[in-house]
């Protein structure tokens, strides 16, 4: 599946669906749910990396969310009560609860910056 962008629609992605039909959808989380058929010219489209549409729900991204730092690790699973989940969802507001949890945990326990080896001092 291929992904495109257009200067005529800067806030939308244009990409192929599972059948090869061009669709247009908003550049936002779950934007794929608001997709429509693309009726414009294919000549004005610029092909781009399909990974750019991650998070929109487009099936062509082949993978989940891009990790914030470093290589992805194994998934972390927490078992919580319904009351805890509801409280966390209220605190997250409009954001995805997983994004809120990640940001909250990273704020509480910052990840140390990756240090580069120092070069030898010049004599």
Image: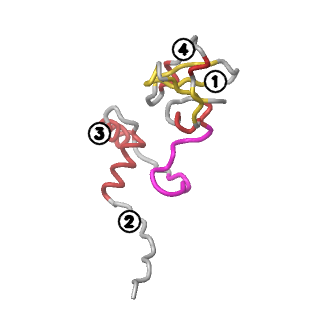
Would you identify the image quadrant in which residue 89 lies? top left
Q: Where residue 44 sits in the image (x, y, percent)?
A: 56, 20
Quarter placement of the C terminus: bottom left
Q: Secondary structure at mark 1?
A: strand
Crowding around mark 1 (Cα neighbors within 10 Å: few <14, some 14 to 19, many 20+) is some
Please state the horizontal and vertical placement of residue 59, each as a whole percent of the image: 61, 30
Left or right of 65, for residue 98: left
Q: N-terminal of the two: label 2 or label 3?
A: 3
At horizontal 70% and vertical 20% (from top left) the residue drawn is 19
Judged by depth in the image, the label closer to the viewer, 3 or 1, is 1
Q: Which residue in the protein does label 1 denote?
A: 16
Instruction: Decide if residue 112 is on the left or right side of residue 22.
Output: left
Disc 4/disc 3 C-alpha distance (Å): 33 Å
Write the start and end of the magenta stretch as one range.
62-76
Mark 3 sits on what residue?
A: 91
Image quadrant containing the N terminus: top right
Vertical arrangement, residue 59 with respect to residue 97, above or below? above
Residue under numbered circle 4: 36
Q: Position of residue 115 (x, y in %)?
A: 42, 69
**Residue with the mark numbered 2:** 112
Q: Along the polypeptide, which appears first: circle 4 or circle 3? A: 4
Is the residue under label 2 in contact with that under label 1 (CB below 8 Å)?
Answer: no
Between circles 4 and 3, the one closer to the viewer is 4
Disc 3 and disc 1 in contact, CB within 8 angstroms: no
What residue do we see at 66% from left, 18% from top? 21
Gap between marks 2 and 4 measured at Cα: 44 Å
């Amino acid at each position: 599946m291929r992904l495109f962008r257009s200067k005529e629609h800067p806030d939308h992605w244009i990409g192929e669906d599972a059948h090869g039909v061009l669709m247009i959808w908003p550049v936002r989380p779950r934007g794929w749910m608001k997709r429509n058929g693309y009726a414009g010219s294919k000549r004005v489209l610029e092909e781009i990396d399909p990974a750019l549409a991650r998070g929109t729900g487009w099936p062509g991204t082949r993978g989940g969310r891009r990790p914030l730092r470093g290589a992805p690790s194994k998934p972390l699973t927490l078992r919580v009560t319904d009351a805890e989940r509801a409280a966390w969802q209220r605190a997250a507001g409009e954001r995805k609860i997983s994004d809120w949890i990640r940001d909250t945990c990273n704020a509480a326990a910052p990840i140390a910056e990756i240090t580069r080896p120092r070069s030898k001092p010049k004599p």
